[in-house]
Every structure is written in C-alpha cells, then in structure tokens.
C-alpha cells in the first residue's frame, strides 16, 4: 500500500546543519558582495555557498551543481538566493578565485569564534597550532605545479595549519611539489597569532624536517 505525501524527501538533510553555520557568516558574506559586486547574475556569496554545498558532500566537480538546479531544499538550507549553473560556477571560480581566497580567513575565524568550538586544549593548558607540509600524489596528471616531492612521488606539497589537538584547519595553501617550507610561511602565521607566550616545537620523529609549530596559551576557559 502506498500513500502520497505533501512534502519532498531529500538524501542530504545534513545540509540544514551546514546552513545553520553559514548563517553565522552573514556579515562576512555581506562584505564579500560589497567588495566584489556583480551587476547582474549570481552574487559571489552564492557562488561560495553553492560550492561549499558540493564540497560537504564530497563533490568537487562543478558539473555536480546541475543535480541541484531544481532542488528547493538545497537553496533554502544553504541560504542561496540564485543557484549558479555549472558554466557560471566554473567561470566565476576561475576568474575570481584569488579575490575569493582573501575572504576565507575571516570566514574561518568568524565561524570558529561564533561556534565556540572545542579546539582540544592540552592538559598543560596550551593550545597547539601545528604547521606542516604533506604531499599529494598527482603523478598520473599533467597539472600545473606537479613536481617531485620530498616523499618521492610526483604531486603537490601543500602547507597546512591545524589548531588544537582536534585538528581545526585554519590554512591550507596548495604549493608546487618541489616547494620547501619557507621561513616566510611561518612568519606569516606568526603575524596573525594573538599576544602571549609561545613555544616552538618540531614535528614527530620521522616527520618532514621543515615542520614547525606554535603553541598559544589560552587566557581563560572561554578564550
């Protein structure tokens, strides 16, 4: 026996939780649209919201957005006013990726500050900010920047910064495979660190010798 229902079912109900956190970022999205205005068409904030809706499902190809063109829940859950087509999403990301990347740090900082996340403070009362490189194996591709990495595979050598023992990713810079960890990368992260005592540490035994870490002492239980 079958019974008709008056509402739609969705296999991606978790997007409602993603949208809940995106609502915390509304002030930054507003700044983004003011800095990168669009006369007609899809706002740049909708470009980010739409692509994020794909990424949280493990989809990175732009064509995947076409599966949600008629999905009202996808738009409503993520707060999207106008959903981009696949060509629009690809063209905008190609043309404005550098400008959009400038807004990622404030988006991440605003999200973590408003969510009051459990970063994983160590028993000694310190909060670790680990900076390290890792390798990506792209040996079967002809992408720009692919080169021989320190692990012996052809690919990229990204630089990542993780906050706390629970591993909140603050920064992930995609770099050429032949790149080595430079002093400038660490200084840039230091410049954004809050005032307070710090202690450098190296990576674990056998780790990339270029690894570096920065430890921050919290000012209080709610810091």
Image (cartoon, grey):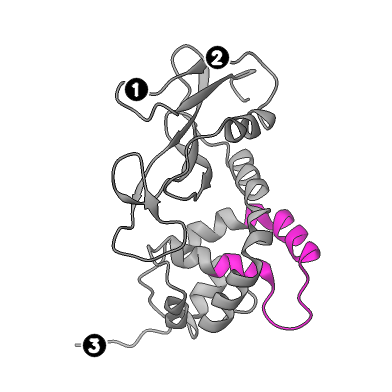
Q: CA distance from mark 1 to mark 3?
A: 59 Å
Front one among 184 and 6: 184
The C terminus lies in which quarter of the figure?
A: top right
Q: Position of residue 149 (x, y in %)?
A: 36, 44
Query: From mark 3 to mark 2, how far is it between C-alphas?
Result: 65 Å
- N-terminal of the pair, mark 2 or mark 1, is 2
Q: Which residue is mark 2?
A: 199
Q: Which mark is residue 204?
A: 1
Query: Taking 12 as reference, is 162 left or right?
Result: right
Label 3 residue SS:
loop
Check the image and report above or below for 196 versus 96. above
Q: From which residue to which does the magenta span run?
A: 23-50
Percent coordinates x, y for residue 46 in the rendering: 63, 70
For the residue carrying disc 1, how many other residues have a C-alpha within 10 Å: few (<14), some (14-19), or many (20+)?
few
Instruction: Say which quadrant the N terminus sits in.
Output: bottom left
Name the residue located 60 percent from the left edge and 19 percent from the top edge: 218
Q: Residue at x 34, y 22 (%)?
A: 204
Of callouts 3 and 2, the N-terminal one: 3
Most foreground residue, 40 or 203: 203
Instruction: State the separation of the CA atoms marked 2 and 1.
Output: 16 Å
* Residue at which label 3 appears: 2
N-term-proximal mark, 1 vs 3: 3
Compared to residue 10, the image places residue 222 above or below, namely above
Residue 194 in view (yes/no): yes
Residue 79 visible? The answer is no
Q: Is residue 149 left or right of residue 51?
A: left
């Amino acid at each position: 026996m079958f019974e008709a229902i008056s509402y739609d079912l969705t296999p991606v109900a978790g997007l409602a939780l993603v949208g809940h956190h995106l609502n915390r970022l509304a002030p930054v999205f507003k700044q983004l649209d003011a800095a990168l205005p669009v006369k007609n068409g899809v706002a740049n904030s909708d470009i980010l919201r739409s692509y994020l809706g794909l990424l949280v499902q493990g989809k990175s190809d732009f064509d995947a957005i076409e599966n949600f063109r008629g999905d009202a829940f996808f738009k409503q859950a993520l707060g999207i006013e106008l959903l981009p087509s696949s060509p629009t999403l690809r063209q905008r990301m190609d043309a404005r990726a550098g400008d959009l990347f400038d807004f990622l740090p404030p988006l991440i900082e605003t999200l973590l500050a408003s969510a009051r996340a459990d970063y994983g403070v160590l028993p000694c009362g310190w909060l670790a900010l680990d900076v390290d490189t890792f390798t990506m194996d792209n040996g079967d591709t002809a992408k720009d920047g692919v080169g021989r990495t320190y692990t012996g595979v052809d690919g990229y050598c990204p630089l990542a910064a993780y906050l706390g023992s629970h591993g909140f990713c603050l920064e992930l810079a995609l770099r050429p495979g032949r790149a080595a960890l430079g002093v400038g990368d660490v200084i840039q992260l230091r410049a954004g660190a809050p005032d307070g005592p710090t202690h450098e540490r190296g990576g674990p035994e056998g780790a990339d010798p270029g690894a570096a870490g920065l430890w921050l002492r919290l000012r209080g239980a709610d810091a």
